[in-house]
Image (cartoon, rainbow, N blue to C red):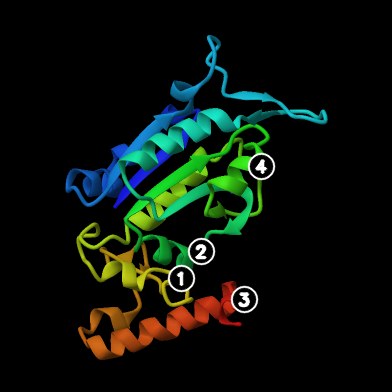
Amino acid sequence: MRIDIITVLPELLKSPFEASILKRAIEKGLVEVHFHNLRDYSIGNYKQVDDYQFGGGAGMVLMIEPIDKCISKLKEERDYDEVIYMTPDGSTLNQGVANEISLKKNLIILCGHYKGVDQRVRDLFVTREISIGDYVLSGGELAAAVLCDSIIRLLPGVLNDETSALTDTFQDNLLAPPVYTRPSNYKGTEVPDILLTGDFPKIEKWREEQAMERTTKLRPDLLE
Ligand code: 6GU
């Protein structure tokens, strides 16, 4: 997979890719992530990438020309499966969407900022609009990092134990069961006995029951 991220704030976006699982995925060559500073495609001597909105109103809007220049250059080099625009009015990211996008080969992710992008960018170039929840962030950068993490960890070979993404919360629309590690007794609070029996079919059954119980209690909407 290759991901090209277009942003006015690349520095806000880079650090999540420089640690832990995402870093290792990049080092292993399982994903390439490239950052493109929109300002490098700006017009005029002032490196302008945004402007006031027609019709008046507060807030700046990212202009179409720098975005067009950046996307066109990328598209000359390879084909893209999706141009994803990160915006609070997009469709909400969930595990199903992450699973679907993780199967794509080349992605462009465009981060909104200020009041967002000129509508013609969305009409002409964007194939999918994604939000990470019903609240407003200052820009699409942190949301793009969330999206990238959710898809990169699903790529084959990224997680050490290849089955572990399959047992994640949400992967089967259930919350994950509780997990424990040593010590089995910490200041009098104990790990459930069943987990210490070594009876794996029974443990599996207990985990399924716990997952169902947790989901019923905490997220009944997932069962609907
Ligand atoms: Cl993708 N962008 C912004 N600016 N705010 C958000 C969001 C995206 N998703 C939730 N809130």
- What whole-number distance in Å separates the C-alpha atoms at marks 4 and 2? 25 Å
Say what amino acid the circle numbered 1 marks: Phe
Q: Which of the two labelled residues, at mark 4 and mark 3, occupies the earlier sequence position?
A: 4
Say what amino acid the circle numbered 4 marks: Gln
Q: Which of the two labelled residues, at mark 3 and mark 1, occupies the earlier sequence position?
A: 1
Give the structural element (helix, strand or loop) at label 1.
loop
Residues packed near mark 2 inside 10 Å, few (<14), some (14 to 19) or many (20 plus): some
Q: Are marks 1 and 2 in contact (CB under 8 Å)?
A: yes
Q: Nearer the viewer, mark 4 or mark 3?
A: 4
Q: Nearer the viewer, mark 1 or mark 4?
A: 4
- What whole-number distance in Å separates the C-alpha atoms at marks 3 and 2? 14 Å
* Residue sitting at x 57%, y 81%: 223
Q: Indicate yes or no: mark 2 CB to ligand 1 under 8 Å.
A: no
- Residue 192: % across, % down: 35, 78
- Which residue is labeled 2 in the image? 94
Q: Which of the two labelled residues, at mark 1 and mark 4, occupies the earlier sequence position?
A: 4
Q: Residue furthest top?
A: 45
Numbered mark located on residue 119 in the image: 4
Q: Which of the two labelled residues, at mark 1 and mark 2, occupies the earlier sequence position?
A: 2
Q: Which of the two labelled residues, at mark 4 and mark 2, occupies the earlier sequence position?
A: 2
Numbered mark located on residue 221 in the image: 3
In the shown orientation, is residue 198 left or right of residue 45?
left
* Residue sitting at x 61%, y 78%: 220
* Residue sitting at x 44%, y 33%: 70
Say what amino acid the circle numbered 2 marks: Asn
- Residue 123: % across, % down: 62, 48
Say what amino acid the circle numbered 3 marks: Asp
- Which residue is labeled 1 in the image? 170
